[in-house]
Amino acid sequence: LCFSPPTDASMSPDAIKQSHWCNVAYWEHRTRVGRLYTVYEQSVSIFYDLPQGNGFCLGQLNLENRSETVRRTRSKIGYGILLSKEPDGVWAYNRSEHPIFVNSPTLDIPNCRTLIVRKVMPGYSIKVFDYEKSCLLQHATDLDYADGPYDPNSVRISFAKGWGPCYSRQFITSCPCWLEILLSNSR
């Protein structure tokens, strides 16, 4: 099945509101903090501190014995990101004062063994998931280049700290604060 946004105009507003398009997991290094946050609206703010508005507030998630590195990184999240489901894909808008780092199957170069992590500066946005590219990737059967479990419908976003071949942190689980965006199969 290809990833495609719902196009059925006959769906009632109640049916649309009831279905979610993604879940968001917040991680500190290798530890998931809090429950999955289910997203029903077209966009969601994910932030540490937002003066007005609503969304997924990371500042309210508690974890005992948090390291100093995690505390410092959490303080840099600020207004965080706005994640938005658009007709062509899912976009992330960086509203913090520090860069975010993004990895997604649709940002990777097909059949490339090098992990692609994109740096997104404050005030900029990136299409973190492309529906059309996802459909093409799902038809590709050569996943030999993938190390470990591979989810073609997930996006990983790290706050303030990069990872991958160009950084001292080789894996996202080495990043102090990061998100896993799990796109719904009922898209």
Image: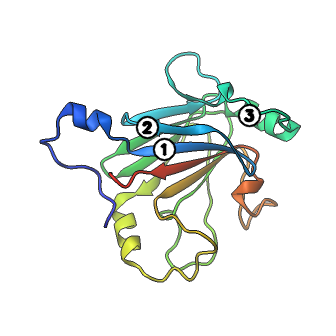
Q: CA distance from mark 1 to mark 3?
A: 20 Å
Kind of residue indicated by mark 2: Val
Q: Is residue 41 above or below residue 151?
A: above
Kind of residue indicated by mark 1: Asn
Q: Which mark is residue 166?
A: none
Kind of residue indicated by mark 3: Arg
- Tag 3 residue: 74
* First of labels 3, 2 by sequence position: 2
Quadrant of res 76: top right
Q: Nearer the viewer, residue 166 or 89?
A: 89
Q: Is residue 69 above or below residue 107?
A: above
* First of labels 2, 1 by sequence position: 1
Q: Where residue 3 appears, x then y in whole percent?
A: 34, 60
The local secondary structure at tag 2 comes to strand
Q: Residues within 10 Å of mark 2 (few under 14, many from 20)?
A: many
Q: CA distance from mark 2 to mark 1?
A: 6 Å
- Tag 2 residue: 39
Left or right: 92 in relation to 147: left
Q: Which mark is residue 23?
A: 1
Q: Nearer the viewer, residue 121 or 100?
A: 100
